[in-house]
Image (spheres, rainbow, N blue to C red):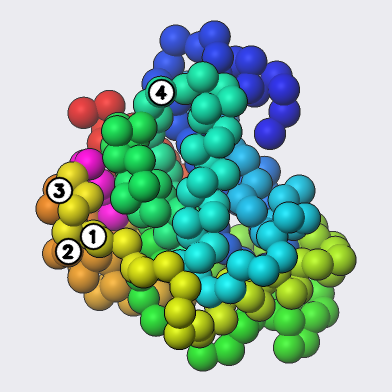
Amino acid sequence: MSATSEDAVRTGVHPVLVLLHGGGPGVDAESNWASVRSRLSGEFSCLAPDLLGFGTQIDGSAGIEGPRAWAQARAQRILDMLDRLGLERVHLLGNSAAGGAAALALLSLAPDRIGRAVVMGGAGTGPLPPVVPFYGDPTKESMRATLARLVADESTHGELLDELAEIRLQQALRPGAESAFRSMFADVADGPPPVDLTKMVNPVLALHGARDRVSPVEVSERLVDALPNAHLQVVAGAGHWIHVDRPDEFCRLVGEFLNA
């Protein structure tokens, strides 16, 4: 996140929206939100930080084990950023098992600092994946195959997938990236307790692609059932990457909900 974007948020007239990227290998904020950030910036002052354990934030993440601990550590980093920027209240857009889980942790940790939240793909509330993706075969071909599962139809995104596979391969092979990523999916017996969804009173919109091949729609259905003030919108024709498969509909749904 550049100094220019931070200055714009400090002085902007739009509501502040914090974009919390997904949790795939080699991800960062810039590549995750490239398909929609410019459009969202027409309605919101967008902050898109790299989350702890990814991109520019790999250092300083040693010792964190398991998805709950990672979500809480990321939430605290976001709160620290809000304090540094003097932001009292923001909206959240959280993608999948990294950004979505961090958004839920923020709603639990500091509900008064959050207005509304949009979460995607189940927000990491489903079961842990049976195997850690990509790192068992860390090649460009494996990375592309991993990314292809995130869209509904890879044949319509071939050029984008090729480009992202190259970018994310380089980032996934940076020193410390693999150990951090593996620890995110560690099935630990102790650590922080799960967030209490039943006490989250902030309005939440859960978006889920009807053709999601990573997380079934039922995960978001259970999430919305547990939250006191939540609504589920299933996006037809979209996979796990709703913002890539259906960017226009995605931005419309996010804008309508956050501006309500």
Give the percent coordinates (x, y) of residue 217: 29, 71
Please name the residue shown 64% across and 53% down the image.
52
What secondary structure is marked by label 4?
loop
Q: Where is residue 216 in the image (x, y as percent from the top left)?
A: 34, 76
Q: What is the C-alpha distance between the residues marked 4 and 3? A: 22 Å
- Give the SS element for disc 1: helix
In depth, the one of 2 and 146 nearer the eye is 2
Determine the main secondary structure of the stretch shown in magenta. Answer: strand
Query: Which quadrant: the C terminus?
Result: top left
Mark 1 residue type: Leu
Label 3 sits on a secondary structure element that is loop
What residue range appears in magenta? 202-206
Q: Nearer the viewer, mark 4 or mark 3?
A: 4
Q: What residue type is labelled 3?
A: Asn
Spatial distance from mark 2 to mark 4, Cα to Cα? 27 Å
Which residue position is annotated with label 3? 229
Whether pointer 1 and pointer 4 mark residues with C-beta atoms closer than 8 Å, the reply is: no
Disc 4 residue type (three-letter): Glu
Q: Gap between marks 1 and 2, in whole Å?
A: 6 Å
CB-based contact (under 8 Å), mark 1 and mark 2:
yes
Query: Mark 4 or mark 2, which is nearer the start of the sequence?
Result: 4
Q: Which of marks 3 and 1 is nearer the N terminus?
A: 1
Q: Which residue is drawn at 29% across and 73% down?
A: 219
Mark nearer the N terminus (4 vs 3): 4
- Which residue bears the numbered disc 4? 88
Q: Residues within 10 Å of mark 3 (few under 14, many from 20)?
A: some
Q: Circles 3 and 2: CB distance less than 8 Å?
A: no
